[in-house]
Amino acid sequence: MLMETFTRNRPYDEMFQENLNMRSWVCNLLAVAPDDIIDGTLLESEDIDFEKKLCCVSSILELALNCTAESPNERPNMK
């Protein structure tokens, strides 16, 4: 749900076909161009403290990626 909220995409969007899914898309772009995946209505490059906000949202998306790891052993412990 966090990935949906911050990217404004749905996991069943038509762009996610074959080997591409929301998780892999976020994972791939977060490393190279995080501002390309974040919904433009939430964060714009002209915003005051853009870099700080981008860092914060990127951290949230990293958490979402960690929580959706394929293997349950790779996911963070709730404790």
Image (tube, grey):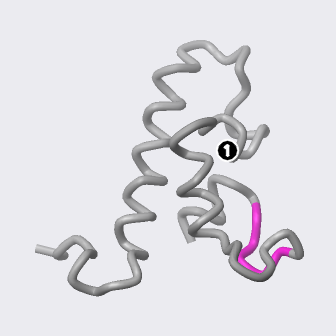
Q: Residue furthest bottom?
A: 72
Residue at 78% x, 74% y is 16
Q: Which of the image's four quarters has the N terminus?
A: bottom right
41 relative to 71, above or below: above
Magenta residues, dominant SS class: loop
Magenta stretch? 9-13
Q: Is 56 left or right of 19, judged from the image as shown?
A: left
Residue 64 appears at what percent x and percent y? 44, 64
Quarter location, residue 73? bottom left
Residue 5 appears at what percent x and percent y? 64, 60
Which residue is under mark 1? 38
60 relative to 42, above or below: below
Residue 60 appears at what percent x and percent y? 43, 51
Q: Amino acid at mark 1?
A: Ile
Residue at 43% x, 76% y is 68
Quarter location, residue 76? bottom left
Q: Residue furthest left?
A: 79
Q: Is 75 left or right of 18, judged from the image as shown?
A: left
